[in-house]
Image (spheres, grey):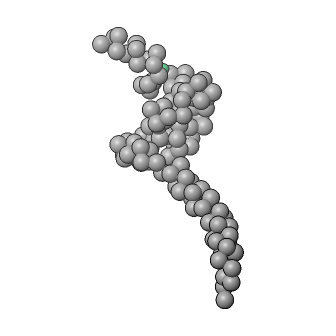
C-alpha cells in the first residue's frame, strides 16, 4: 500500500517535482546557453571558422566590443573566435588589437561608410 493517505501521496509528488524540475530546467538552460540557435547559425555562416584568423578551431564567444568597455552581451556583439584570438584580443577593440582586420566597432563602421 504505497499511499494510505492521499494527501501524503500528493506531498510526495510535490517533493519529487520540486527536486526534479529545477534539475530539468537547469539542464535545458545549460543546453540553450552552450548552443543557442543564433550562435549555431552564426557559426554556420562563418563556416565554423574563427571570425579573426579564419582557422577551423573550437570556437568561443568573443564580444566585438568587450564587456569591459560597455559592449552588450547580445548576439549582435558576439562573434565566434578561437581561444587564441579571444585571449590575445582580451578587453580591446579589434582596431586596437589588429589594425589589419576590418573592425566592426561603431567608430570604424562610420569611417568606412564615410569613405565610400
Ligand atoms: Zn582565431
Ligand atoms: Zn574599431
Relative to 32, is 113 above or below? above
Taking the view exactly as shown, the residue that stands out farthest to the left is 116
Give the residue displayed 46% in from the left and 36% down from the top: 75
Furthest residue toward bottom: 1
Q: Residue 105: x, y in percent?
A: 47, 22
The one nearer the camera, 55 or 27, is 27
Quadrant of the image containing the N terminus:
bottom right
Q: Is the residue 78 above or below the residue 112 in the image?
A: below
Residue at 62%, 58% in the rendered image: 22
Q: Quadrant of residue 106?
A: top left
Query: Is residue 37 shown above or below 28?
Result: above
User: Percent x, y for residue 71?
Assistant: 55, 27
Quarter occupied by the C terminus: top left
User: Does residue 85 appear in the picture of this structure?
Assistant: no
Query: Position of 88 compared to 81: left or right?
Result: right
Residue 44 visible in image? yes
Relative height, residue 2 to residue 35 (above, below): below
Taking depth in this image into account, of 52 and 67 the one nearest to the observer is 67
- Position in image of residue 62 (x %, y %): 53, 37
Residue at position x 65%, y 77% in the image: 6
Q: Nearer the viewer, residue 77 or 108?
A: 77
Q: Position of residue 23 (x, y in %)?
A: 62, 61
**Residue at 44% over, 44% down:** 39
Count of numbered labels shown in the rendering:
0
Amino acid at each position: 500500500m504505497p499511499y494510505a493517505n492521499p494527501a501524503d501521496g500528493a506531498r510526495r509528488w510535490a517533493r519529487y517535482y520540486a527536486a526534479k524540475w529545477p534539475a530539468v530546467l537547469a539542464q535545458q538552460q545549460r543546453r540553450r546557453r552552450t548552443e543557442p540557435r543564433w550562435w549555431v547559425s552564426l557559426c554556420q555562416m562563418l563556416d565554423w571558422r574563427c571570425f579573426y584568423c579564419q582557422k577551423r578551431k573550437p570556437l568561443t564567444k568573443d564580444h566585438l566590443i568587450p564587456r569591459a568597455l560597455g559592449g552588450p552581451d547580445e548576439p549582435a556583439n558576439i562573434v565566434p573566435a578561437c581561444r587564441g584570438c579571444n585571449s590575445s584580443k582580451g578587453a580591446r577593440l579589434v582596431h586596437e588589437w589588429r589594425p589589419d582586420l576590418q573592425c566592426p566597432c561603431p567608430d570604424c563602421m562610420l569611417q568606412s561608410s564615410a569613405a565610400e
